[in-house]
Image (cartoon, helix red, strand yellow):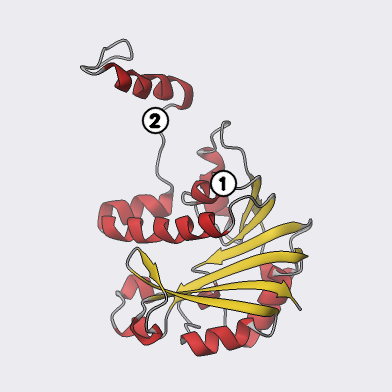
Amino acid sequence: MTDQAQTKEPQYELLYRVKQEHGISRFGIMANESWNKDPRRTLFTLARYKFVSKMFEGRKRVLEIGCADAFGTRLVQQTVGHITATDFDPLFIQDAKERLDKHWPMDLIIHDLLSGPIPGSFDAVYALDVLEHIEPAVERQFLTNALGSLEPNGVAIFGMPSLESQDYASPQSKAGHVNCKTMPDFKKLMEEYFHSVFMFSMNDEVVHTGYHKMAHYLFALGAHKK
């Protein structure tokens, strides 16, 4: 079918205009793996980004820590002013830059948060599926640097698999997980950095406030930085 083809219903001609303007989008290397090996996991990951996008709607300068291939970052980008996305792995940042759409500009930076804060000032910071990869001995160093660029009135979201979920996680999901937490322990850690911490549970793509021991994933939303 060519770009000059006419669809049966005229409203779908928009599909070809978007194709001409943006091309055909590609998965990132991480999203591509999950889409081909476990498509439902792709949905669960994107649902985490959707939660952040709703919580951060209207924020002006947002920092993502541990963006990987930055495939899900666009969901947050849709509701905020500007995104700076970082990862410590150059291959992920290279992949994200190769797929960057000029209509969806973002800053992509290689940075290891254990080495220091990101330069600049942000009114929101988030990290999904990152903290569980940070050794407990250096988690406070990581969090101090992660929040070093957060403005006093800014907000932050950290998300990680629950400790209880690891009994059911696949070997791939558990690989590198050295610091999963229960919700009470997660909240206690976040309260070292924020006066207000709000906890959410997640099962599959559903975010809720149900019994935390049955949650597969946890969100901590921090406000009023100490």
For residue 90, side relative to residue 206 (left or right): right
> What residue is pinned by disc 2?
24
Residue 122's mark?
none
Q: Looking at the image, do the residues carrying marks 2 and 1 touch, with CB atoms under 8 Å apart?
A: no
In this picture, is 90 found above or below 144? above
Describe the element under mark 1 as helix, strand or loop: helix
Residue beneath the point at 36% across and 79% down: 215
Sequence-first tag of 2 and 1: 2
Specify the amino acid type for callout 2.
Answer: Ile
- Helix, strand or loop at mark 2: loop
Q: Nearer the viewer, residue 40 or 191?
A: 191
Of the residues shown, which amino acid type is indicated by label 1? Gln
Along the line of sight, the residue nearer the viewer: 223 or 181 = 223
Q: Name the spot of residue 81 as percent of width and height, x first.
A: 66, 45
Q: How many other residues sit within 10 Å of disc 2, few (<14), some (14-19) or many (≥20)? A: few
Residue 63: percent from left, percent from top: 65, 57
Taking 198 as reference, is 206 left or right? left
In the picture, the disc for residue 77 is 1
* Residue 88 locus on image (x, y percent): 61, 61
Binning the other alpha carbons within 10 Å of mark 1 as few (below 14), some (14 to 19) or many (20 upward) gives: many
Numbered disc in front, either 2 or 1:
1
